[in-house]
Amino acid sequence: MSVVNLAKMFFMIMDILMNEDDNYIIAGNEIIAECTGFSVSYVLQLTPLFLKKTLTCLHKSYPVRLKGIYCTNTPKVFETVFNLGKTFMPAKLKNRMYLFSKSHANKLHTYVPQCDLPEELGGNNGSVKDLTVEWKQKVESYREWFLEDSRYGSNEKLRVDTSQKHCKIL
């Protein structure tokens, strides 16, 4: 799967959460990225422009407080991409980004309670496989809603301040 498709899926899930869960907007968002299998082919897709657009969209386009980004089981090549991505974030958000190499993955528990983690990350909140099935069904149930939503947009030629163009990533 391409990183563009991963980003699309991520933002679709955020849309669903905002639509269904008022507490999500109030409590904020913690992102856990399990990076086992992160390969060089992904690194090549993570261009500075893509990172900037994605992180800017995440930070400025959604009314959700980003409480933390936790990347676990990261290979060494990921650290460079991770640090590059941090350059596009305000200092406040940089301080909420955490990287855990394979040898330090157990430190995630100091930031995220075990009751919120899947079994594969040492938690007791179901398996990743079960969560994947559940969210696949949830996203598919919103098919018509996303198709309808894709019909709408803005005419960027009419925008006075062109700095907002960076949010059109997908």
Image (cartoon, grey):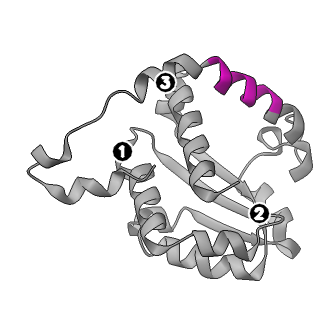
Task: Give the residue drawn at x 51%, y 71%.
Answer: 85
Question: Eyeballing the image, is 142 above or below 160?
Answer: above
In front: 39, or 111? 39
Kind of residue at badge 2: Cys
Q: What range is drawn magenta here?
A: 133-141
Q: Is residue 134 magenta?
A: yes
**Which secondary structure, mark 2?**
loop
Q: Is residue 132 left or right of residue 21?
A: right
Q: Is residue 142 left or right of residue 164?
A: right
Relative image position of residue 110 (x, y in whole percent): 75, 58
Task: Give the residue drawn at x 85%, y 42%.
Answer: 118
Kind of residue at badge 3: Leu
Task: Give the residue drawn at x 36%, y 50%.
Answer: 168
Task: Give the residue drawn at x 86%, y 63%.
Answer: 106
Provide the residue designation for mark 3.
Answer: 147
Q: Label 1 neighbourhood size at 10 Å, few (<14), some (14-19), many (20+)?
A: few
Provide the residue designation for mark 1.
Answer: 61
Relative image position of residue 91 (x, y in whole percent): 40, 69
Q: Label 3 neighbourhood size at 10 Å, few (<14), some (14-19), many (20+)?
A: few
Q: Is residue 19 magenta?
A: no
| Principal secondary structure, stretch drawn in magenta | helix
Q: Mark 3 or mark 1: name the one nearer the start of the chain.
A: 1
